Amino acid sequence: MNKEALKNSINKYCKVKYGKSLGEAKDYEIFNALSLALLEEVVDDWSETKALYNQGKKAYYLSAEYLMGRALGNNLISMGVYDEVKEVLNELNIDLNAIEEIEEDAGLGNGGLGRLAACFMDSGATTNIPLQGYGIRYSNGLFNQKMVDGAQMEEVDTWLKYGDPWSIRKDDEAVIVEFSDYSVKAVPYDMPIIAYGSKNVNTLRLWQSESLESFDFDLFNKQEYTEALKCKNDAENISRVLYPNDSKEAGKLLRLRQQYFMVSASLKDIIRTHKAKFGSDFSSFGKEHAVQLNDTHPVLAIPELIRILVDEENVKFKDALSIAKTVFAYTNHTILAEALEKWDVKLIEKLFPRILEIIRHIDFVFVQELEDKGYDKEAINEFKIINYNQVRMANLAIYVGFAVNGVAALHTDILKDTELHNWYELYPEKFQNKTNGITPRRWMRLCNQELSAYITELLGTESWVNNLSELKQLEKYIDDEAVLNKLMAIKKTKKEQLAAYIKEVEGVELDPNSLFDIQIKRLHEYKRQLLNAFYILDLYNRLKANPSMDIPNVTFIFGAKAFPGYVRAKAIVKFIGEIAKKVNNDPVIGGKMKVIFVENYRVSYGEKLFPAADISKQISTAGKEASGTGNMKFMMNGALTFGTYDGANVEIVQEAKEENNFIFGLRVEDIEQIGGKYNSKEYYEADLSLKTVVDALVDGTFCDGGTGEFQDLYNSLVNEGDTYFLLADFVAFKEAEDKVFAAYKDQKHWAQMSLMNIANSGIFSSDRTIMQYANEIWGITPKTVK
Ligand code: 26V
């Protein structure tokens, strides 16, 4: 990269966009000018990549969520110019770090499923796979979380407020999406996904919904201004927010509209590229295109493809269904019943009656197939796509999809053995496992530059960044004191950096010499943040009773957003806030332990938290966490897993060995065995320390502001069966924590355990995952731009 040319380019964009010299520009203006200057460097490679990919089979990832986070730092790493650009900016008296921090996160997702999609985009580019992402360009991403007196409040996210320099709007490729009541324009915004180590630039195409006309001229002229703008508002609402509240019918309809909007626009786009190459010959469609359905949200793509083929391209229904059966593959991301989508037939009929007709037709054919195979009526009811006037989206996906995958070995086993057992018996050949992964560019190379530099020094090359299994070579330093000391020194640096950031944004002082124990993830009962909270409260009680108790200083950090309508999740946030207040303000504790719930946990906050952790808390009820990916981010950065035998934790300890982690609690088979016989009250009554912390919900120790929320939490555990086995796992949790404290005393051994985790994290690179999708599902090979 030519430094002078880059300086000129930044200056130029600053001038033409803001009419200012660089010296006068605000940080966000510099961010935009710099981003445009960098984009300019990749656009030619981007065009070349598109042309190259158009020559063969392509895969498309359809996802309602992309939790991209910030683009600038990541793109600098991928382009291999981070240090150079830092120098250039230094020479201009600009601090790159401050410019990075001004960027808003693109938070177009909720949690793991959306972040996985973002990691897959990165890995698809880096492994040179012809993979394109499709999604929705929500103008407001996931809400911003404000903590008001320990309780969560939601504020609208305005990620576009400083502009969106990394997207290119493609007006000439807009398509029209039709609903029964009106039609809208889907306008694509393309984001470059820049490969690390090659010239490939992949595309994430996000659709924005706009009105066909800007307003109704007649109505405006009649001075009926609100009515005149109705069509514009209706259209723009479709891509306004992620998961609109669906407690009423209007919200449900909006969600359904969003899903159809996304899949209809994407399929029209795919068909347009197909026709440009093959005209109206669709016989090779499945050889040219593979569509991965990220959970059930994009499953309407199936009837939409059939609709287009039958109604617009003169293909017979039977042939269209056969084509669809070669195109779609479905990933299941959860076994929680509440997340398995079902849509009322009435709603589908209201918005797109033809789609309902097609779904009915598919179901009819499916039932015939089952009858031919000799299934009886009862068995057929289990499989049917439409049942009790609801369309079961997963059933549609599994019947038409040619592959179905879970996201970790245990999760796939559970799908095969229990949740989808009947489907597995019907179509054993469709089922596959694809254990999740994370991109080492963002989750190591960018967010932990100190550790990355040191690994490169030890291995003598940076090739580990896109060949992560090379980390295994680090095992040879297991007894090397200098290496172990350096690893601990780097961890300390990351803890100091986090502490400084938390001091700045939260106003809370943390001790970087204490053990950092971190639980960051969506707030959900099955993830059991409440169990962690109970443990912390119990530790506090013990420390109060015995202030000279022999434990290392410890800092418990939480980060989580609770879904706005999820009352219990919000109550848990409040409860943790109450505990934090009590513990942090108690002079007897004197800094031995501290609790903090950080505000507005998101991708960019995660980049500061993961590298600073000593302990990674992964304590979901066995069988409930499909995979988890935060667990992998912690591991790669040298934290030890404190967790249950669940999701990818199982594979983490398989790789890094159980003795280098802290595994506790009931396993899937234990829970199956206990089954309906579980009596949480027995556990509650059997252990006084447990009873004391559970009672704290209701005995006046803490205040829920008179809402009764804490009483409801209490009831869920003591009187309503404790669905997630918190009380049953409490004692095992405590014992495992004792082992953590004992182990932390031996810093050398701790460093060895940490090294083992880093060295064995290679398999959790999403490069490995995406290559498995390409080889084993899509039948696609890499294509590298020369
Ligand atoms: C989402 C929501 C959002 C609204 C409130 C209720 C609710 C309940 C469940 C879900 C889960 C949606 C699916 C999901 O995000 N699954 C996650 O996918 C990750 C990537 O495969 C995986 O690592 C996580 O274990 C899994 O929970």
Image: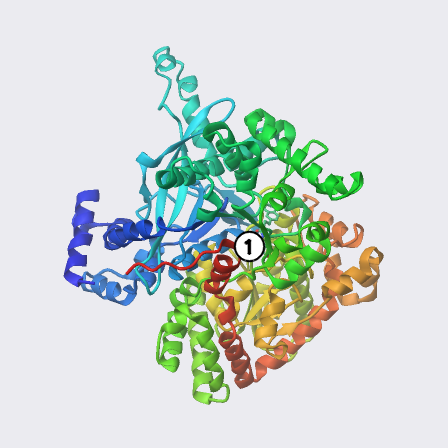
State the residue in front, 640 or 685: 640
From this viewpoint, is residue 479 visible? yes
* Relative to 248, 762 lies left or right: left
The scheme the figure's colours follow is rainbow
State the residue in front, 505 or 250: 250
Identified at 45% across, 36% down, the residue is 239
What secondary structure is marked by label 1?
Answer: loop
Which image quarter is the N terminus in?
A: bottom left
Quarter assignment of residue 708: top right
Identified at 61% across, 31% down, the residue is 248
State the residue in front, 763 or 518: 763
Identified at 55% across, 84% down, the residue is 749
Identified at 48% across, 78% down, the residue is 472
Residue under numbered circle 1: 560
Quarter assignment of residue 369: top right
From this viewpoint, is residue 601 visible? no
Counting from the top left corner in percent of width and height, residue 463 is at 37, 73
